[in-house]
Amino acid sequence: MNVSVAILHYPWDSVGGGERVSLTLLLGLLEAGVDARLLTGPSFDAEAVSRILGIEVPRDRVEILDLGRGLLDLAAARFRLGVYARGLSQALRVSGFLESLLSEREIIVETRLGLPLPADVVYMHYPTAAWRPRGRGPLWLAYRGLVRILERRLGLPWGRGPGVLVTNSRWTAALIYSVHRRLARIVYPPVDLEWVPLTRGSERLALTVSRFVPSKEVHRLLEARLDSVGYRLHLVGGAHKPVERAYLARVEAMARSLAWVSIHPNAPRQVLVDLLSRARYYVHPPFPEHFGIAVAEAMAAGLVPIVYCDGGAWTDLVKPSGAGACYRDPREIPGLIERLEPLWDEQSERARRYIRSRTDLTPRGFTERMLTIIKEVHEVKDTGLSSPSPAP
């Protein structure tokens, strides 16, 4: 396939599941012989990617962009504007660059902002517009006015959108449809199982893997009191941005007097390998996770999953596996562990077999499905280029 692909992941401000998707796509396309490059921001850190994700990035395939910061971005940082307004302010800069980047020969895949931008393919991890303001009062009225201005400048919600919209789970696809009335194709994120060990379940440990961001409410897992059933809880996750580091400090302060809680911020992969090889349960924060790569990895290791009763981790992974359980309130978790404990061997094997039988969750399966979509877009664009112009 004689086509070039540019993967636009801007800004780069974390090292998590979204970044794994963009990098796995880059490496998969290169392995398939496609001329591919990653366009990202100045904060890109190849060493952090290697340490945390275990991915070695070819430096010659990464192009660093600096689209600057306008007055709107400074205002967003200064006054802590909501998620949606911050996303729109970032999208304004990216959208202008995107329009200049779009050519007739290169396929543009946008993987970061969660908005229906005019790329050839948009991989939407979560619809940012779901954060659209709904409050009342003078401040909310002013905020909604700002949002409407930003939406008009971006041509949302009726402007030119992506050629193909892709997302990470049935749950997220349903949310996208409710927000944008667009039907998204589902391509599950890549779950690399080559490094995932099989747990011995040798210790009474529960493991949580999550970025330390306020929206995921990791701190609420401290309400679970796993020590009441003789378990320790290990929290593993990244904290790179100032808001994440501040939230991490809050969680650490809350856990300081809890001897049954251990926290591992920005831990290298080997720490996670060690914990996966010993733990018995995986406990996800009370957050409707869009998909949950960490959940899938833990299940593949044989940890019995306990997740929140909403989100893609429940609807697309745990529920169809028939293993584990879900909760509404973290205080339910000790009781769920007590109920699952006599069935642990069978539940562990069921979780492991289910994930390891899902070829659509592998990096190869992910790349093949994305490559099929890219080929479809290329054929459509190429047909348009080769067809004669219609007569006036």
Image (cartoon, helix red, strand yellow):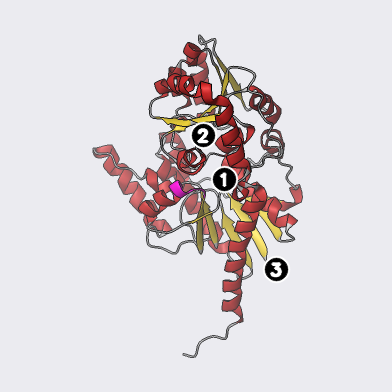
Give x and y (percent) for residue 278.
Answer: 65, 22
Residue 239 shows in this picture: no
**Closer to the camera in the image, 320 or 147:** 320
Give x and y (percent) for residue 234.
Answer: 57, 21
Read off the magenta span.
168-172
Eye-nearest disc, 1 or 3: 3
Mark 3–mark 2 Cα distance, whole angstroms, equals 42 Å
The first of marks 3 and 2 along the sequence is: 3
Q: Identify the secondary structure beneath mark 2.
A: loop
Magenta segment: does it hold 225? Answer: no
Mark 2–mark 1 Cα distance, whole angstroms, equals 37 Å
Q: What residue do we see at 52% from left, 56% from top?
A: 122
The amino acid at mark 3 is Met
Instruction: For the residues labelled 3 and 2, say whether their Cβ atoms are less than 8 Å apart.
Output: no
The amino acid at mark 2 is Ala
| Residue 1 badge | 3
**Closer to the camera in the image, 359 or 172:** 359
Left-right relation of 295 to 59:
left
> Which residue is identified by label 2?
323
Give x and y (percent) for residue 376.
Answer: 58, 68
Q: Identify the secondary structure beneath mark 3.
A: loop
The residue most toward the left is: 137
**Closer to the camera in the image, 143 or 18:** 18
Q: Residue 239 sits in which quadrant?
A: top right
> Which residue is identified by label 1?
11
The amino acid at mark 1 is Pro
